[in-house]
Image (cartoon, grey):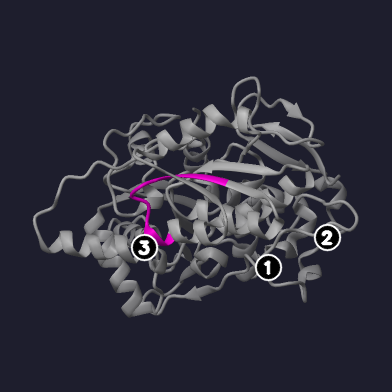
Amino acid sequence: MRISYLECTRCGEHLSADRSQNVCPKDGGVLYARYDLANLKGKLRPQDLRGRVASMWRYAEVLPELEAGEKPVTLGEGFTPMLPSREYANVYIKDEGLNPTGSFKARGMSAAITMARHYGLKKLAAPSAGNAGGALAAYAAAAGLEAHIFMPKDVPIANRMECDYFGAHVTLVDGLISDCGRMVAERKEQEGWFDVSTLKEPFRVEGKKTMGYEVAEQLGWKLPHAIIYPTGGGVGMIGMWKAFDEMEQLGWIGFERPKMITVQVAGCAPIVKAWEEGKSASEMWASASTFAAGLRVPKAYGDYLILKILKESSGTAVAATDEEILAATRHWASAEGVFAAPEGAASLVAYEKLRASEFFRPEDTVVLFNTGSAYKYLDMMEAQEKRARTVPASRHIGGIIGPY
């Protein structure tokens, strides 16, 4: 097997990759898949990628190896376009909304479901407030596996419907994503489910790290000055940072790294708060509220990794209001032709704030991530438009991706 071992990001414990694993049994730390990159160095070169499939599986040597005759569970995810901004010089929009199921979640689920099938797992479960559920349902359907998805009743209608049409077993919960997570945790042993929640298994990170490889390849193997990433659970940022380390070990890039910028919504900004207070972990955010469902994460399971990345990269964390995000969504659509998910449009808000504060200079190359398609959020966006025209109504929505 190409993976040498799984490594705990807290205590450094090494675990076997010969069987399915969730988190470190000692301290609950997130597990990273580690490869023999020293042996691969020189044998795999950037020029060897030319002519390969235009999907994330073009980087197969740094993804989990399959047995002879096995193929990855793929729907064509990855290698999304890097669009030069029409408004700002040196700015690029990485449009993840063009992935299967309309978001970057397709990358992680492609890798996770591929390995679940490899390990012989039959039933997969996860809580979801949106796109992760849709991606799990789609890839489980493609692999012939059962998907059990627990979603709050107020989930965007597109997410609920796609899970249903893909044949997943969907439970709508009168509560928050934290309630959904507890249900998965309480029932998984009895039901024989394997938990594929955010950062609860090692391979969703592997799929999402391919965004880092693509950024480097699409910019001619020169990393940008900064990357702005909408951060809920933060797996995309965590994955890209892992990818940069792997590429340096392969000799593809040097020691330089982009400044990693977290953007969250003002109504749920635990990473921003922890960053401003100089803490190494975040606190649970009370009464999380936003129409950008993917940013409604009051405490990310990998918060300690996100905050470490911000520090190591000399990055920062920015909050955007729902009003700013809605305006940015409309502006990006009309100015760039990109119909971004609210989470993605938050990247534009962050960039403009950081330009105004002179954190960025006009000549800095910056990549803004649009993590999904606005078509998945039409009902939420329409409701937000109506709220913006009337007196705001109080609505308590929120949840947690974390240990249950």
Task: Indicate whether residue 8 is drawn in magenta.
Answer: no
Q: Gap between marks 1 and 3, in whole Å? A: 25 Å
Residue at the spot of label 3: 377
Q: Is residue 131 left or right of residue 70?
A: left
Residue 65, position in %: x, y?
82, 51
Q: Which one is in front, 18 or 234?
A: 18
* Quarter of the view holding residue 382: bottom left
Residue 126 rendering spot, x and y as whole percentages: 54, 42
Amino acid type indicated by mark 1? Ser
Q: Nearer the viewer, mark 1 or mark 3?
A: 3
Q: Name the side, left or right, on which 17 lies relative to 158.
A: right
Report the magenta residues as a range. 148-158
Image mark for residue 55: 1
**Label 2: which secondary element:** loop
Mark 2 → mark 3, Cα distance in angstroms: 40 Å
Give the structural element (helix, strand or loop) at label 3.
Answer: helix
Residue 222 makes an appearance in the image = no
Q: Is residue 71 above or below residue 243?
A: below
- Callout 2 touching callout 3 (CB < 8 Å): no
Mark toward the start of the polypeptide (1 vs 3): 1
